Image (spheres, coloured by chain):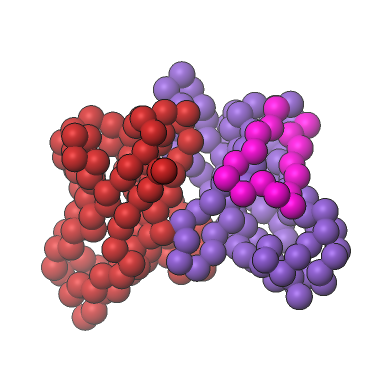
Amino acid sequence: IAGITQAPTSQILAAGRRMTLRCTQDMRHNAMYWYRQDLGLGLRLIHYSNTAGTTGKGEVPDGYSVSRANTDDFPLTLASAVPSQTSVYFCASSHMGSTHTGELFFGEGSRLTVL
Amino acid sequence: GQNIDQPTEMTATEGAIVQINCTYQTSGFNGLFWYQQHAGEAPTFLSYNVLDGLEEKGRFSSFLSRSKGYSYLLLKELQMKDSASYLCAALDSNYQLIWGAGTKLIIKP
């Protein structure tokens, strides 16, 4: 593994189903993030984690949950998918030093379609 | 509220220069980022400015004016591979990134 890896890269899902998007990084970054990207809108933060064992809500957290059991993994779960969750999901990580200004490293994205 | 404005789309000619503007309104300010995103790919970091002025990095330069809430990304000697979306993002007082919708840059031969 080099960098940050997401799986699956693409998924079609029936509404009401549960889905977990996986994200793993091998850069030992403290902070990890989940974003969704929709046409015409900026990246929107769903959830974040500043360090293992802690998580926080972003701009659009409803319908999503995350966990951060260790430094490397940050899965995103849709408990009961709805069509409005059709989007491209990006996982990202950064090394948050004292300045909190670390650049983000993104995974390749997971394209999710909810029917 | 917090807001980032940048043009939706721009067109430029191969070999030319293009400037992509970004204005921001945030609660506090801790710096401004530019990212490049090719179609179907992940965003990649281009630049970070926290002080006023111009930062040059090869063919790409980024400028910041904190008093005006304004930044631009300058791309010189445009190449076809520069066709991409360019995302502006400001870091607010809580160190949260506020993203613009991106500027799609189309390069014509």
- Decide if residue A65 is on the left or right side of residue B14: right
Magenta stretch: includes residue B51:
no
Q: Which residue is drawn at 34% across and 31% down?
A: B29
- Decide if residue B85 is on the left or right side of residue A32: left
Residue A25 against residue A64 in the figure, above or below: above
Tell which chain the image draws in red: B
Q: Which residue is drawn at 82% across and 53% down?
A: A79
- Decide if residue A57 is on the left or right side of residue B26: right
Q: Residue furthest bottom?
A: B109
- Decide if residue A36 is on the left or right side of residue B8: right
Residue A54 at x, y percent in the picture: 70, 27
Q: Which residue is drawn at 60% across and 63% down?
A: A88
Residue A51 against residue A6 in the figure, above or below: above
Q: Residue at x 20, y 72 (%)?
A: B12
Tell which chain the image draws in purple: A
Q: Quadrant of residue A109?
A: bottom right
Q: Nearest the camera: B22 or A52? A: B22
Q: Residue furthest front?
A: B1
Q: Can residue A91 be seen in this view?
A: no
Residue B11 at x, y percent in the picture: 24, 74
The chief SS type of the magenta part is loop
Residue B21 against residue A99 in the figure, above or below: below
Q: Nearest the camera: B1 or A10? A: B1
Range covered by the magenta-colored residues: A54-69
Instruction: Please give the count of numbered marks on the rendered protein.
Output: 0
Residue B96 at x, y percent in the picture: 48, 36
Q: In which quarter of the image is residue B36?
A: bottom left
Q: Is residue A48 visible?
A: yes
Residue B102 at x, y percent in the picture: 38, 60
Q: In which quarter of the image is the C terminus of chain A?
A: bottom right
